[in-house]
Amino acid sequence: MEPQTLFLKIIVIGDSGVGKTSLIQQYCHGFYKPHTSATVGCDFTTKVLTKFQHKTVRIQLWDIAGIYLI
């Protein structure tokens, strides 16, 4: 039986300064950085999960720059 790979792309959107980057860093890398600079444009991180029987899940999380509303 060949291992199956599932590939998911998730875009994280929201207002500027709500913690999108911190949420992604905590989930993918396991650390929290209290002061991060604003994302310019977009950034992405990939996390690989091996779950279930012979299935690998690759999650690509896109961090999109927030909109700052006055």
Image (spheres, helix red, strand yellow):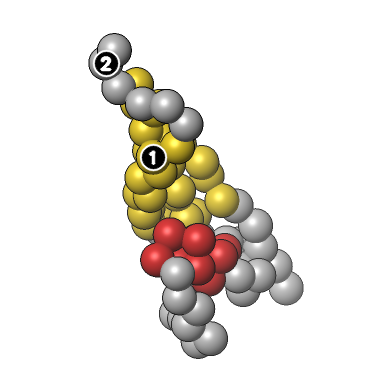
Q: For the view shown, which residue lies furthest in the left direction?
A: 2
Residue 70 visible at all: yes
Image coordinates for residue 52, horizontal then vertical, percent: 47, 31
Nearest the eye: 40 or 11: 11
Q: Quadrant of residue 19?
A: bottom right
Q: CA distance from mark 1 to mark 2?
A: 14 Å
Nearest the eye: 18 or 47: 47
Q: Which mark is residue 50?
A: 1
Residue 7 visible at all: no
Residue 46 is left or right of residue 8, and the answer is left
Q: For the view shown, which residue lies furthest in the bottom direction?
A: 35
Quarter of the rendering occupied by the N terminus: top left
Q: Quadrant of residue 56?
A: top left
Image coordinates for residue 9, horizontal then vertical, percent: 45, 36
Say if 69 sits above or below 32 in the image: above
Q: Quadrant of residue 7?
A: top left
Nearest the eye: 54 or 32: 54
How many numbered dots are placed on residues in this image?
A: 2
Label 2, on which residue? 2
Circle 2 Cα neighbour tier, 10 Å, few/some/many (<14 / 14–19 / ≥20)? few
Amino acid type assigned to the residue bearing label 2 in the image: Glu
Q: At 26% across and 16% down in the image, what residue appears?
A: 2
